[in-house]
Amino acid sequence: MDRIVDIATDGRHLSMHRGFLIVEEDRAEVSRIALDDVHAVIVHAHGTTWSANLIAALDQPDGAIRRSLRTPCRPIRSSRSEIAGQQQLAVWR
């Protein structure tokens, strides 16, 4: 299953543990998703932090970053738009 993880809440921390993407808020786990199921991670929240191990795992040859680069993309809306005062990146499918 290819999931798109959308982080919209400010102050979340993203890390990796035993093959899972872990989403934490105030050092409490909010979500756990198998990295093999992650197709893309979209972050449009302020103050989001990432662990270096997670970035390295997503950048593996079969990781989400590389899979997303191989997938033909077309923008749903312009690459940078102002919506409700927040700058957001385009959603690709």
Image: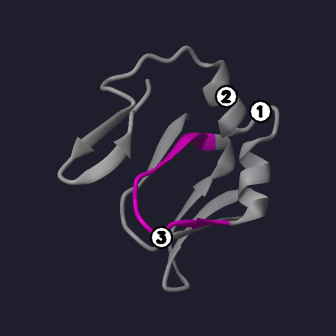
Out of 78 and 4, give the one closest to the viewer: 78
The x, y position of residue 46, in whole percent, is: 42, 65
Q: Is residue 14 placed above or below 44 in the rendered structure?
A: below
Looking at the rendered structure, the kind of residue marked 2 is Arg
Helix, strand or loop for disc 1: loop
The magenta span reads: 37-50
- Residue visible at 25% across and 43% down in the picture: 82
Q: Which mark is residue 48?
A: none
Of the image marks 3 and 1, the number of the one nearer the N terminus:
3
| Category of crowding for the residue at label 1, using alpha-carbon neighbours closer than 10 angstroms: few (below 14), some (14–19), many (at least 20) | few
- The residue pinned by badge 3 equals 47
The x, y position of residue 48, in whole percent, is: 51, 66
Q: Please indicate whether residue 12 sits to the left or right of residue 22 in the image.
A: left
Q: Please indicate whether residue 37 sits to the left or right of residue 66 in the image.
A: left
Q: Which mark is residue 67?
A: 2
Looking at the rendered structure, the kind of residue marked 3 is Gly
